[in-house]
Structure formats: C-alpha cells, structure tokens
C-alpha cells in the first residue's frame, strides 16, 4: 500500500459508510483528511477553508450541487487534484468539463488497489513521490 505523508484530502461522498471507509483507507496511507461531507456546496466551502491537495468527489450527492459542478467551482479556488468516484459511468461528462486537474475516476465499489492507483495519479499530478507503506 502506497501513501503520501501529509497529503491533505477532502472527501465528498453521500453514503456515510463509503465515506468512513475511504477516510480510514486514506488515514492508514498517511493522508490527513481535513474535511468530509455528503454535500457538494459544503465540499466547495471545505476546500476554500482547508486548501487540500486532493478532493475525492462522488458525482451524485445529497444537494443540488453534484460532484462535477463542485469540481468546476473548486477549480476556481485552488489547484487541488480531483478524484471522482461513482457507481455510474460519467466519464464522458467528466472529460467534457475540460478540467485539467482530474487525477482519477474511480468506479464504486472500490478496492484498496483502486485508491492506491488514484493516489499514485495524484502524486504524479502534484509532483510528489509516493511513500511505500
């Protein structure tokens, strides 16, 4: 399992169990989860406050701001890498946004290996070497 010590993350996932599982995975990998929410609007606020390195965004959320809209807003606030998560195929819609900081698109349910691969893409995007764990 690879990780990046001190990598700051925000998680935006509407399913509490998935959110908790991802937080545990990231924490065990040495990441610092600085915020978590089930709402797109709140994710944007958390990013504005905490300026994370990476934002894990589900596409379908509990409010009117979905993950794609949240990513577009986040893109104007900071240079955080984006990892989209979804049980549905939104690849075409995501790629149509033109966002340059998309590190990965992870299908749910996800495995540890998919999160490892996503973090490797994040470190490539941020220019940080991964730490072996």
Image (cartoon, helix red, strand yellow):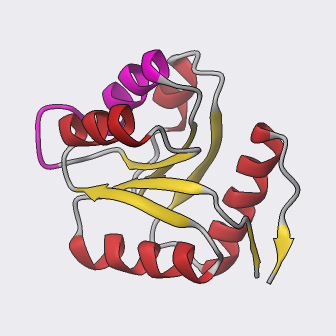
- Residue range highlighted in magenta: 62-77
> Which residue is pictured at 45% across the width and 63% down the height?
33
Position of residue 118 relative to residue 53, above or below, is below
Position of residue 114 measured from the top left corner of the image (x, y, whole percent): 65, 68
What's the magenta bit mostly, secondary-structure-wise? helix
Position of residue 107 measured from the top left corner of the image (x, y, whole percent): 52, 60
- Quadrant (top left, top right, bottom left, bottom right) of the C terminus: bottom right
> Which residue is pictured at 33% across the width and 37% down the height?
49
Total tally of numbered discs in the picture: 0
Position of residue 40 measured from the top left corner of the image (x, y, whole percent): 24, 39
Position of residue 39 relative to residue 20, above or below, is above
Position of residue 77 measured from the top left corner of the image (x, y, whole percent): 44, 21
- Quadrant (top left, top right, bottom left, bottom right) of the N terminus: bottom right
> Which residue is pictured at 41% across the width and 27% down the height?
74
Q: Is residue 88 magenta?
A: no
> Which residue is pictured at 50% across the width and 30% down the height?
94
Q: Is residue 65 magenta?
A: yes
Is 116 positioned to the left or the right of 24 in the image?
Answer: right
| Residue 23: quadrant of the picture | bottom left
């Amino acid at each position: 399992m690879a990780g990046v010590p001190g990598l700051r993350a925000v998680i935006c996932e509407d399913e509490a169990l998935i959110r908790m599982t991802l937080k545990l995975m990231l924490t065990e990998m040495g990441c610092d989860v600085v915020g978590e929410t089930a709402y797109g609007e709140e994710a944007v606020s958390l990013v504005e406050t905490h300026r994370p390195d990476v934002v894990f965004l589900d596409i379908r959320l509990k409010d009117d701001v979905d993950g794609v809209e949240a990513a577009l807003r986040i893109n104007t606030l900071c240079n955080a890498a984006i990892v989209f998560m979804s049980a549905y195929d939104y690849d075409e819609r995501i790629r149509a946004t033109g966002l340059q900081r998309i590190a990965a698109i992870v299908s749910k349910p996800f495995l540890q290996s998919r999160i490892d691969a996503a973090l490797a893409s994040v470190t490539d995007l941020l220019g940080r070497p991964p730490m072996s764990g």
